[in-house]
Image: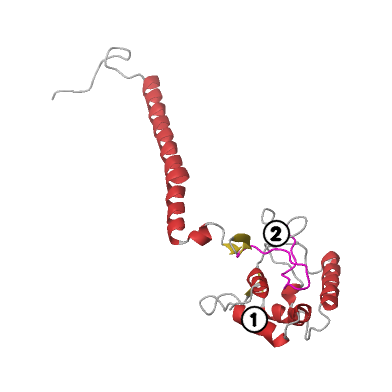
Amino acid sequence: MLDTRSNTPAGRPGTHPAGELERDGILAHLRTSVLFTVVSVLALGLVYPVVMTGIAQVLLPSQANGSMVTVNGKIVGSDIIGQLFTKPQYFHGRPSAAGKNGYDPTATGGTNLGPTSKKLIDATRATIAALKKENPDATGPVPMDLVTSSASGIDPDISPEAAYYQAPRIARVRNRSLEDVRSLIAASAHPRELGFLGEPRVNVLELNIKLDHPPR
């Protein structure tokens, strides 16, 4: 039989020393890695964000731009970011631990205090006392969401019970009937998502806008 195995010594023309083969293998892997990195950056860092942004702008333009709320052409806030209301003629939202003054969307977070924390207990007692003083005509227990901050600190909603608790103050300061204010709350309440997700809620900004600009 014909022996086809090469007997050419290493180093002669046509041979591939081990070092050269190893170098070629490394270069091949390097080219593959660079190509994969470039393609990944272009596809996932440029093409995908641009495509998704374009789809969002077409299908959900309001949500894609921050769910901004405007009144008479002027932006007054966002539908998904709570803000601080302190004047007695407005409904107040949940306490906030986000940022130095609360409701800071760049520093979201809760108090991170445990249920046995003396600091939390003292702050809760002080909040309850302030709420009762601010709402002397309110009836029933203080709603829990008016006492505790949310995990994000920028929750834009309160429970309908929290809104009804504040209704007597709103009616008195604005010189409106209590029934009128309660009807406005009922009309502004959002039900559970899909009928079973979450809890009924009232958007504080939406409700306060309706106070200043009653629906006709």
Mark 2 or 1: the one toward you:
1
Q: Position of residue 82 (x, y in %)?
A: 67, 64
Where residue 156 appears, as percent x and y from the top left, is 65, 67
Check disc 2 and report its element: helix, strand or loop. Answer: loop
Tell me what residue is drawn at x 67 percent, y 62 percent. Answer: 152
Q: Which x, y percent locates residue 145?
A: 72, 73
| Earlier-in-chain disc, 2 versus 1 | 2
| Residue 174 seen in the figure | yes
The residue positioned 44% from the left and 37% from the top of the image is 37
From the viewer's perspective, is residue 131 above or below residue 61?
below
Q: Give the number of marks.
A: 2
Q: Magenta stretch? A: 79-98
Q: Which mark is residue 212?
A: none
Q: Residues within 10 Å of mark 1 (few under 14, many from 20)?
A: some
| Residue extending furthest toward the left | 1
Q: 139 or 68, which is in the foreground?
A: 68
Mark 1: amino acid: Leu
- Residue 109's label in the rendered image is 2
Magenta stretch: dominant SS?
loop
Q: How far apart are marks 2 and 1 (CA)?
A: 31 Å
Front one among 208 and 17: 208
Image height of 86 relative to 132, above or below: above
Name the residue carrying label 1. 184
Q: Is residue 69 magenta?
A: no
Tell me if residue 181 comes above or below residue 158 in the rendering: below
Magenta-drawn stretch contains 88 = yes
Which of the 4 image quarters holds residue 36? Answer: top left
Q: Is mark 1 on a helix, strand or loop?
A: helix
Residue 63 shown left or right of residue 99 in the figure: left
Q: Which amino acid does label 2 sit on?
A: Gly
Which quadrant is home to the N terminus? top left
